[in-house]
Image (cartoon, rainbow, N blue to C red):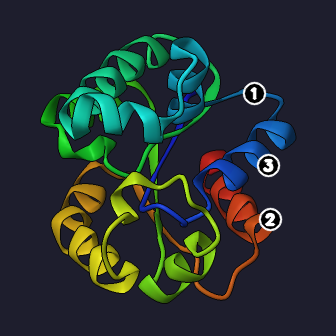
Amino acid sequence: MNIFIVGPMGSGKSTVGKIISDELFLDFYDTDEEIEERTGASIDWIFDLEGEDGFRKRESVMLEEMVEKNSIVLSTGGGIILSAFNRELLSSRGTVFYLSTPISVQIERTSKDKDRPLLKGGDPRDILTKLDVERKDFYESVSDHVVKTEDKTSQEVATEIINLVKT
């Protein structure tokens, strides 16, 4: 059983994923953390040096490796679903949960984080709205379950996912 979590930045993918992995005694991985660990560089720095295309290539390679594992919870980067190859990997190797999160919540959760390359150089509301328009259909198409996060704690979202996994 593999649990893959997709959604926009600030949706709580990593926090929820860690709770699920703890409660179900599964290994937890985060594609962004794995990339940073292996390269010794921050995502922000990779974006600066290689651009978004270079980062997306690294992300696909990491995802290919991660989906070969069994009994894991994987939190993915917000843009991982942009690639048809990545969407196919996710849907074929586990159960995909989309954390649907309002723009206002994303803004609140990302406001203090300066390491979000896509939020640099513009109004966060405009950027997050544009990303939502570009990505929402991909999130929905790849996911087995859409979990709305509005007005829920991370624990409540994790419990909802655990209950869905057990049914």
Residue drawn at x 85%, y 43% is 23
Residue 67 drawn at (x, y percent): 44, 19
Residue 147 drawn at (x, y percent): 51, 68
The answer to whether residue 50 is seen in the rendering is yes
Disc 2 target residue? 155
SS at circle 2: helix
Q: 9 left or right of 149? A: left
Q: 98 left or right of 10? A: left
The mark that comes first in sequence, 3 or 1, is: 3
SS at circle 3: helix
Residue drawn at x 83%, y 29% is 25
| Three-letter code, disc 1 | Leu
What's the CA distance linking mark 2 and mark 1? 16 Å
Q: Tell me if residue 156 comes above or below residue 143 in the rendering.
A: below
Quarter of the view holding residue 80:
top left
What's the CA distance linking mark 3 and mark 1? 10 Å
Residue drawn at x 50%, y 23% is 35
| Three-letter code, disc 2 | Gln
* Nearer to us in this view, 53 or 76: 53
Q: Are marks 2 and 3 in contact (CB under 8 Å)?
A: yes
Q: 71 left or right of 61? A: right
Residue 143 drawn at (x, y percent): 35, 52
Disc 3 target residue? 19
Q: Identify the disc placed on residue 26.
A: 1
| Three-letter code, disc 3 | Ile
